Amino acid sequence: MNSANSDANTMATNLLNGAPSEHIAIDDRGLLYGDGFFTTIRVRENQIEHWPLHAERIQLSAEKLKFPELNIPRIEKELRSFINNQYEDSGVVRLTITRGCGPRGYRAPSEPKFSIIASWSSFVSSGELQNGVELSICETPYSKNSALAGLKHLNRLEQVLAQEEIPESCFDGIMLADDLIVGGSKTNIYFYREGLWLTPSMEVAGVNGTVRRWLLANRRDVQVSVFGLEILSLASHCMVTNALHGVVPVTKIGQHKYDVWPQTAELNRAYCQDSI
């Protein structure tokens, strides 16, 4: 991104390296190979929610994918300028970073010129979600790959296929790897049992979401575990999380029904209040 372009960016809903754009190059490695990553950011009253968690995701993703060092303070500065130039004061930004363009072939260029893409979308959260949502169980599995586990990389074909299975009545669908629950197609998942919230391990698959990381850092009753579909009949409560909706109670998965955990609303408020 380039701060010199900030005046020209007024009302641009998509930026590529600081300039308004609706296109990327046909030889961009993000397009050709999925060589990059992204983070989805909730904006409320022109403020980025939980920026430190997103900055940490950017840093860890770049390191795991062996990107040269990114200038995260500069990315943050340009992102805030981009947000302040929108008509709406609340919405969603998807920040995508690819290794940029390069010669044909998988080998990465030695000195890549990153493509840093910011895209703005309107967003209105439904308060009805706090009454509870339904989940389905997907047949499409998560692939296991410890080198990529936890990352929100650009290869999302599993989620694309899973979404085709999920009924419109369901908020999300549970995905598994080798009969072990990994999470939802767009959420992290938690099951309440014997006073603890259990969330699946991200050692071999899944996306380590920003809300999940906040919960693990701030709640002693949230722990990482390993389990399959047997947890559906053992748990007394269930919830899912993502950066757009925060904490969402689950009231039904197939034939299994759950009461909304009494402290769900309080937990969601704590997450939101700690966001700026």
Image (cartoon, rainbow, N blue to C red):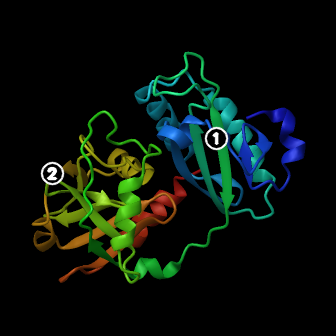
Q: Which is more toward the observer, 108 or 124?
A: 108
Q: CA distance from mark 2 to mark 1?
A: 41 Å
Q: Is residue 150 above or below residue 258?
A: above
Query: Residue 64's quadrant in the figure?
Result: top left
Element type at mark 1: loop
Point out residue 178 in the picture as x, y percentages from the top left corner: 14, 53
- The residue lying furthest to the top in this view is 110
Task: Please give left or right for residue 141 compared with residue 53 in the image.
Answer: left
Q: Nearer the viewer, mark 2 or mark 1?
A: 1
Q: Residue furthest right?
A: 7
The residue to which callout 1 is attached is 26
Residue 184: percent from left, percent from top: 33, 62
Quarter of the picture containing the N terminus is top right
The answer to whether residue 263 of the structure is visible from this angle is: no
Tell me the residue at 17%/50% (across/down): 225
Res 276 visible: yes
* Residue that lies at the very extreme toward the front in this rendered image: 104
Instruction: From the top left corner, tell me how far across and down residue 269 is, in percent.
Output: 48, 65
Q: Which residue is mark 2?
A: 226
Disc 2 residue type? Val
Q: Specify the amino acid type for callout 1.
A: Ile
Callout 2 touching callout 1 (CB < 8 Å): no
Q: Residue 203 versus residue 138: which sits nearer the camera?
A: 138
Left or right of residue 234: residue 174: right
